[in-house]
Image (cartoon, helix red, strand yellow):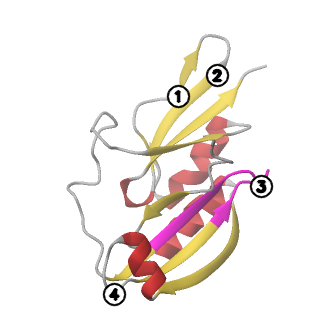
Amino acid sequence: MAIQRMDNVGIVVEDLDAAVAYFEELGMELEGRAQVEGLVADRCTGLDGVRCDIAMLRTPDGHSRLELARYRSPAAIGDGPRDRPHNILGTHRVMFAVDDIEDTVARLRPHGAELLGEIARFEDSYLLCYVRGPEGVIVGLAQQLT
């Protein structure tokens, strides 16, 4: 048996509104918000007394989704500084294909985005960069060159 598709990537955040605004500026579309709690949430997560607010966003093509969650209970646990480098074990990043990488970085800066290095050219194929976004999440951007 094989998987059907990747449904979504989940990211736990403290400021749900700021994270939603960041990813909307990137070009994602808000599908909706909800509060998740109860026995199903407890069983699924392996936690007791789960109560969290979630926002589900999708890419414009409708094929990928991002679930942002703000835990009210139990409280979210920080696991160290948020400005960790990319090579830490278990570090996650989300990569998005964009039309104009420089414009995208410029639009994200007012939302707190910081380039980790610089925009780099990979052969004659891509412009690539990593930006640190809300809650320290590393977001990769890739612009395919013609």
Which badge, 1 or 4, comes first in the chain's sequence?
A: 4
The three-letter amino acid code for the residue at tag 2 is: Tyr
Name the residue tied to disc 2: 126
In this view, 86 is above or below 35: above
Residue range of the region highlighted in magenta in the rendering? 57-69
Residues under labels 2 and 3: Cα distance? 23 Å
Callout 2 secondary element: strand
Name the residue tied to disc 4: 49
The picture places residue 65, in percent across and down from the top left corner, at 64, 57
Residue at x 30% of width, y 73% of height: 76
Marks 4 and 3: which is nearer the front? Answer: 4
Which badge, 4 or 3, comes first in the chain's sequence?
A: 4
The picture places residue 35, in percent across and down from the top left corner, at 53, 86
The picture places residue 49, in percent across and down from the top left corner, at 33, 87
Residues under labels 2 and 4: Cα distance? 45 Å
Which badge, 3 or 1, comes first in the chain's sequence?
A: 3
Marks 2 and 3: which is nearer the front? Answer: 3
Name the residue tied to disc 3: 62
Which badge, 2 or 3, comes first in the chain's sequence?
A: 3
The three-letter amino acid code for the residue at tag 4 is: Gly
The three-letter amino acid code for the residue at tag 3 is: Gly
In this view, 123 is above or below 110: above
